[in-house]
Amino acid sequence: MPRAHVKRNINCEKQNLINLVLDIEDYPNFIPYCLGSKIYEKTENEDNTYIVADLTIGKGIFKDTYKSDVKYIKKDSKIFVKNIDGPLNYLKNIWYFHENQDFTAVSFEVDFELKNKFLNIVMTRSFNYGLNKIADAFQKRAEDLFNKS
């Protein structure tokens, strides 16, 4: 139900940003609303990286864990995420990375629907605000760790 697209130009190398997104177990250290994470499976080959992981997200009295399937396509510099289990009917998000001379353009598309219809209504109203806070947190973390200047 909530669907959005965020784009940021970040003063970091593309591969560092990709690695940051794939470091799911570090999310609770800097992502708002992320209360916990766990990687169950991670496999890599020369073309792709596959990860199965849980994220526990919440705010106030609302807290839930969902399992996701993450696929990084190396040649395309794209990360695809979909839900496997949890409070979501579906989750589809894609990360795009394009390195320019002075920065890397990062785009994040997300589309999801919660199983709980009431929470869907609540999330829809605050979704863009929350997504921008998360994007800000990724950008700050990346610049703190990898800033080119």
Image: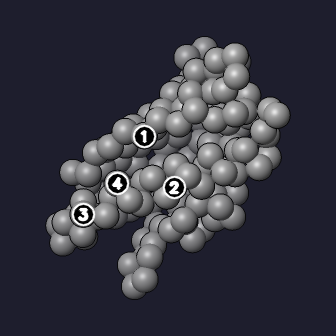
Task: Identify which amino acid the numbered label 2 is placed on.
Answer: Ile
Sort mark 4 into few (<14), some (14-19) or many (20+) by Cα contacts within 10 Å. Answer: some
78 relative to 1 in the view: left or right = right
Task: Identify which amino acid the numbered label 3 is placed on.
Answer: Arg
Task: Report the residue at 58% width, 32% height from top.
Answer: 9
**Residue located beneath label 1 in the image:** 6
Residue 105 figure quarter: top right
Task: Identify which amino acid the numbered label 4 is placed on.
Answer: Asn
Earlier residue among tags 3 and 2: 3
Q: Position of residue 69 (x, y in %)?
A: 49, 43
Task: Report the residue at 54% width, 65% height from top.
Answer: 32
143 relative to 114 in the view: left or right = right
Sort mark 3 into few (<14), some (14-19) or many (20+) by Cα contacts within 10 Å. Answer: few
**Residue located beneath label 3 in the image:** 125
Q: In this view, does 57 lie above or below 111?
A: below
Q: How far apart are the two marked residues, 3 and 2, measured between alpha carbons? A: 16 Å
Q: Nearer the viewer, residue 2 or 88?
A: 2
Earlier residue among tags 4 and 2: 4
Q: Is mark 3 on a helix, strand or loop?
A: helix
Q: In this view, does 58 lie above or below 85?
A: below
Q: Is mark 4 on a helix, strand or loop?
A: helix
Instruction: Give the label on residue 128, or none.
Output: 4
Instruction: Give the label on residue 134, or none.
Output: 2
Earlier residue among tags 4 and 1: 1
Q: Is mark 2 on a helix, strand or loop?
A: helix
Q: How far apart are the two marked residues, 1 and 2, measured between alpha carbons? A: 10 Å
Q: Position of residue 82 (x, y in %)?
A: 41, 43
Q: Where is residue 35 in the image (x, y as percent from the top left)?
A: 57, 71
Q: How far apart are the two marked residues, 1 and 3, measured between alpha carbons? A: 17 Å
Task: Report the residue at 78% width, 39% height from top.
Answer: 147
